[in-house]
């Protein structure tokens, strides 16, 4: 497919996922409709797009098999009805080994899944919010990077904690990615310290557009997520951000949609100005 030369209209969503998919879809589907009605051709959802369970037991109850997911079927149907591409930031599916997978899905305007990416880097961390995060205890990591074409523009799929591993983004950019999706459910403490600077850094380092849909508010398990969904240009400017009141953690208080038109020529311009991707350092000596 020839390289796209026309801008892509995109939207990124920010909301507070509930403890079940049924509850979350009541918020999410109208937001998708609104984003499409405002002209978006690619609509990006955050990590944990359909639920953040109240407990590990609830996660096991709520997660669906990847090959038989009524929730995914609804999202595919909505994408087809609206004629849009839908980046489902991630869904939690049951894995064969008894754990789960944290999987981003790119649904095309035909309503079929065009690409799948399983989160590679597991969030095992303590960020000072009274919780211990150990994703590796419950999720099986992915083992490959994934790119997909959206209206002729190569797009690299990643999820949340991947953001802290710049080598992945450099590889995606060198393989041809011009857009990076980084859907997240960033904790409030780490987000307040690192979110903006890391997203801008990944855009600057790669000369890519970055789309970072985000969870916000306090969820069923008591965790608080940061919000501040962003779209960042290849030169590092923030071109759209959901206004977020950091003092208000109520569910739904900071929901929002941002839009941008992404011109692939901006990627070419940024990379021509600073051609760092072409540099292959030699550390052998």
Image (cartoon, rainbow, N blue to C red):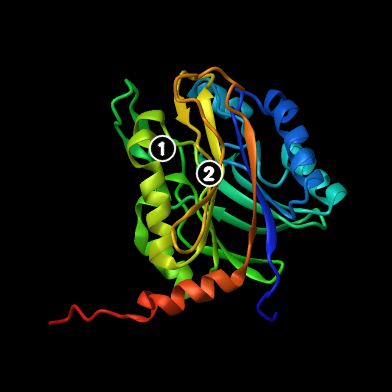
Give residue 250's mark. none
Residue closest to the far right = 81
**Residue at position x 72%, y 30% in the image:** 25
Q: According to the image, label 2 marks what residue?
A: 102
Farthest left residue in view: 285
- For the C terminus, give its image quadrant: bottom left
Q: Residue 252 in the image: x percent, y percent?
A: 62, 22
Q: Does residue 188 appear to the left or right of 65 in the view shown? A: left
Asked if labels 2 and 1 touch by Cβ distance under 8 angstroms, the answer is yes
Residue at position x 59%, y 21% in the image:
253
Mark 2 neighbour density, 10 Å: few (under 14) some (14–19) many (20 or more): many
Check the picture and name the quadrant holding the N terminus.
bottom right
Please name the residue shown 64% across and 24% down the image.
Answer: 20
User: Which residue does the image show at 42% across and 77% down from the upper left?
Assistant: 273
User: Could you say whether the residue bearing mark 1 is in a helix, strand or loop?
Assistant: helix
Camera-nearest residue between 65 and 106: 106
Q: In the rendering, at what x and y percent does residue 117 appear?
A: 56, 55
The answer to whether any part of residue 96 appears in the image is: no
60 above or below 69? Answer: above
Mark 1 crowdedness (10 Å alpha carbons): few <14, some 14-19, many ≥20 = some
Residue at image mark 1? 135
Q: How far from the left and from the top, in percent, is residue 124?
A: 33, 38
Instruction: Tell me the CA gap for discs 1 and 2.
Output: 10 Å
Q: In the image, 170: left or right of 241?
A: left
Q: In this picture, is 27 found above or below 184?
A: above
């Amino acid at each position: 497919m020839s390289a796209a030369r026309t801008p892509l209209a995109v939207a990124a969503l920010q909301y507070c996922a509930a403890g079940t998919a049924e509850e979350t879809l009541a918020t999410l589907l109208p937001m998708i409709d609104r984003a499409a009605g405002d002209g978006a051709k690619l609509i990006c959802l955050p990590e944990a797009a359909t639920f953040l369970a109240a407990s590990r037991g609830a996660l096991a109850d709520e997660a669906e098999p990847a090959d038989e997911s009524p929730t995914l079927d609804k999202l595919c149907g909505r994408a087809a009805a609206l004629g849009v591409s839908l980046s489902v930031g991630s869904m939690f599916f049951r894995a064969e080994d008894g754990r789960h997978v944290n999987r981003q899905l790119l649904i095309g305007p035909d309503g079929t899944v065009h690409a799948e990416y399983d989160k590679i880097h597991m969030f095992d961390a303590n960020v000072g919010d009274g919780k211990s995060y150990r994703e590796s205890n419950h999720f099986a990591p992915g083992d490959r990077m994934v790119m997909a074409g959206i209206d002729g523009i190569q797009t690299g799929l990643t999820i949340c904690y991947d953001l802290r591993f710049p080598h992945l983004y450099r590889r995606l950019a060198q393989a041809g990615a011009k857009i990076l999706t980084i859907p997240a459910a960033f904790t409030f403490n780490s987000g307040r310290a690192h979110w903006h600077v890391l997203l801008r850094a990944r855009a600057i380092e790669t000369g890519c557009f970055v789309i970072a849909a985000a969870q916000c508010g306090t969820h069923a398990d008591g965790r608080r997520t940061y919000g501040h969904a962003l779209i960042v240009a290849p030169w590092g400017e923030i071109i759209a951000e959901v206004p977020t009141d950091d003092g208000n953690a109520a569910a739904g208080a900071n929901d929002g949609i941002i839009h941008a038109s992404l011109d692939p020529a901006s990627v070419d311009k940024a990379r021509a100005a600073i051609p760092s991707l072409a540099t292959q350092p030699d550390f052998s000596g």
